Image (cartoon, helix red, strand yellow):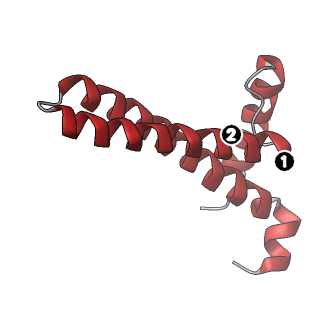
Amino acid sequence: MNILLEHLTGLDTLTDDVIAMDFLMNAKSGVRNYAMAVTECGTPEIKQILMKQLDEAIDSHEKITNYMMQRGLYHPYHISEQIQLDLKNIQTAMNIPS
């Protein structure tokens, strides 16, 4: 899409929002999966490796969350603000031409 058109329609920020939220959701999923894997592993060596990867996944999640919060893309401590942001993003997505 044309950059000028993206700015006029608001799709440039929606794209950043969507990418950041997708990244955050995947990071959350990774944390959850590593945590489950740690509880299911068979040897102490594998458990140690998985726990290191879990720690790294938690660090990544924190960095993504902080990035989004600093840019006003995510309001985890202010639910009413997050709901308003979600509604705005939904409305913008609904206005995208097919």
Mark nearer the viewer, 2 or 1: 2
Residue 26, x across and y down, in percent: 47, 44
In the image, residue 41 lies at what x, y percent?
17, 30
Where does the C terminus fall, quadrant-wise? bottom right
Q: Residues within 10 Å of mark 1 (few under 14, many from 20)?
A: few
**Amino acid bearing label 2:** Thr
Q: Secondary structure at mark 2?
A: helix
Q: Nearer the viewer, residue 70 or 16?
A: 70
Seen in the picture, residue 86 relative to 11 is either above or below; the reply is: above
SS category of the residue bearing label 1? loop
**Image location of residue 50, percent across then percent down:** 31, 39
Most foreground residue, 49 or 97: 49
Query: Which quadrant of the view contains residue 16?
Result: bottom right
Q: Is residue 32 left or right of residue 93?
A: left
* Residue pictured at 20% horizontal, 39% vertical: 45
Residue topped by disc 2: 65
Q: Amino acid at mark 1?
A: Arg
Q: Is residue 72 visible?
A: no
Q: Is residue 34 left or right of residue 13?
A: left
Coordinates of residue 88 in the picture (x, y in percent) = 79, 38
Q: Which residue is mark 1?
A: 71
Q: Looking at the image, which residue is at 82% across and 59% down? A: 10
Residue, far left: 42
**Who's the residue at 39% across and 30% down the image?**
32
- Which one is earlier in the sequence, the residue at label 2 or at label 1? 2
Q: Are the residues flagged by discs 2 and 1 in contact, CB closer than 8 Å?
A: no
